[in-house]
């Protein structure tokens, strides 16, 4: 038993130091994740707005063959790049896709899609369908 306490104390000191360093690392990572989540929430709103405006902006008289896609007018947004397009999937059913990418770090991206039907009053969301988050 003689000489046993020194290795145990050194082991416990090393273990305590490792726990302190790992705790600081986890705290920093959690803070960075929270900041990215807050910035991502801002992109969600931009993507939702772009999706809604895509239904309004598209010229319903434009002829698109089934299976083809057409780019929608570009939307300006500070600190984000927005791409929108519409794909014809059936004679009167279309799929609108919005891709929003942040231009500031951390680089985040949101892509939303929604099926819409062409009616007498323009494009309307399909009943029973909401938006779909695409990854």
Image (spheres, rainbow, N blue to C red):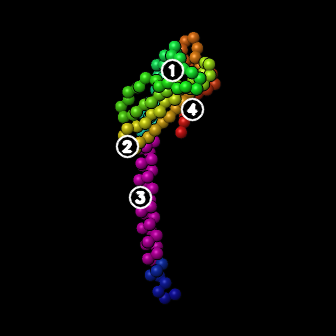
Q: Is residue 125 visible?
A: no
Q: Residue 105's mark? A: 2
Q: Who comes first in sequence, dot 2 or dot 3? A: 3
Q: Residues within 10 Å of mark 1 (few under 14, many from 20)?
A: many
Q: Are marks 1 and 4 in contact (CB under 8 Å)?
A: no
Q: Nearer the viewer, residue 94 or 15?
A: 94
Q: Residues within 10 Å of mark 2 (few under 14, many from 20)?
A: few
Q: Are marks 4 and 3 in contact (CB under 8 Å)?
A: no
Q: Which residue is mark 4?
A: 132
Q: Residue 55's mark? A: 1
Foreground mark, 2 or 3, reads: 2
- Residue bounds of the magenta highlight: 9-37
Q: Who comes first in sequence, dot 1 or dot 2? A: 1
Q: Residues within 10 Å of mark 3 (few under 14, many from 20)?
A: few
Q: Residue at x 37, y 43 (%)?
A: 105
Q: Who comes first in sequence, dot 4 or dot 3? A: 3
Q: Nearer the viewer, residue 70 or 12?
A: 70
Q: Residue at x 54, y 36 (%)?
A: 134
Q: Who comes first in sequence, dot 4 or dot 2? A: 2
Task: Describe the element under mark 1 as helix, strand or loop.
Answer: helix
Q: Main secondary structure of the magenta part?
A: helix
């Amino acid at each position: 038993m003689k000489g046993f306490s020194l290795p145990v104390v050194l082991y416990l000191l090393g273990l305590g130091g490792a726990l302190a360093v790992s705790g600081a690392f986890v705290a920093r990572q959690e803070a960075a994740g929270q900041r990215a989540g807050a910035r991502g929430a801002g992109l969600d709103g931009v993507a939702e707005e772009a999706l809604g405006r895509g239904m309004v902006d598209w010229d319903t008289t434009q002829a698109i063959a089934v299976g083809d896609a057409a780019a929608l007018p570009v939307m300006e947004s500070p600190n984000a790049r927005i791409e929108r397009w519409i794909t014809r999937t059936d004679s009167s059913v279309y799929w609108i896709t919005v891709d929003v990418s942040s231009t500031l770090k951390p680089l985040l991206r949101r892509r939303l899609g929604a099926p819409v039907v062409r009616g007498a009053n323009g494009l309307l969301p399909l009943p029973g369908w909401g938006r779909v988050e695409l990854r």
